[in-house]
Amino acid sequence: MAFHALQVVTTTAEKSDAERIAQAVLEKRLGACVQIGGPIDSRYWWNDRIETASEWLVTIKTLRELYPALEKLILDLHPYDQPEIVATPLEPLSAGYFQWLIEQVRPRP
């Protein structure tokens, strides 16, 4: 089976929401690594006007095969009506890191 790595990002208004999402992703082994950065300044269209917010960036390293379950988990836990969930392929990727990523998301007995 060929695996394909992804980097998935979302943002939250509260650091505690970012931490809750990160913990759930790792506990369910839907990602090998979750980084939380911020706060960041975000500007975006919402309800026909430009909004400004301070947010926390959540970056998840995972496999494409896990994306549907990861997306569902984020949607289930996220407090936003329509959270940002963006996946970007990670290619090329160092062989050692890629192997580590694969090993971390494997289900445990």
Image (cartoon, rainbow, N blue to C red):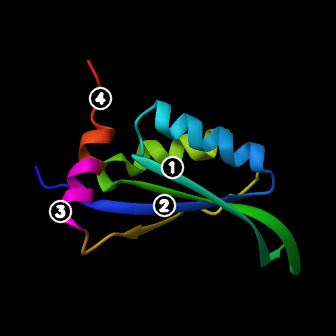
Circles 4 and 3 in contact, beta carbons < 8 Å: no
Q: Residue furthest left?
A: 1
Q: Does residue 47 show up?
A: no
Residue occupied by mark 2? 8
Of the two numbered discs 4 and 1 on the same chain, state the one appearing first in sequence: 1
Please state which of the two labelled residues, at mark 4 or mark 3, is closer to the viewer. Answer: 3
Query: Looking at the picture, does residue 107 appear above or below residue 39?
Result: above
Nearer the observer: mark 3 or 2; the answer is 3
Ranked by sequence position, the earlier of labels 1 and 3 is 1
Residue 41 magenta-drawn?
Answer: no
User: Disc 4 versus disc 1: distance between alpha carbons?
Assistant: 18 Å
Q: Secondary structure at mark 4?
A: loop
How much space separates mark 1 and mark 3, taking CA atoms?
Answer: 26 Å
Disc sitting over residue 107 in the figure: 4
At x 26%, y 69%, the residue is 93
Number of other residues with Cα within 10 Å of mark 3, as a class: few under 14, some 14 to 19, many 20 or more = few
Q: Residue type at mark 1: give it.
A: Glu
Instruction: Give the labeled residue for mark 3.
Output: 95
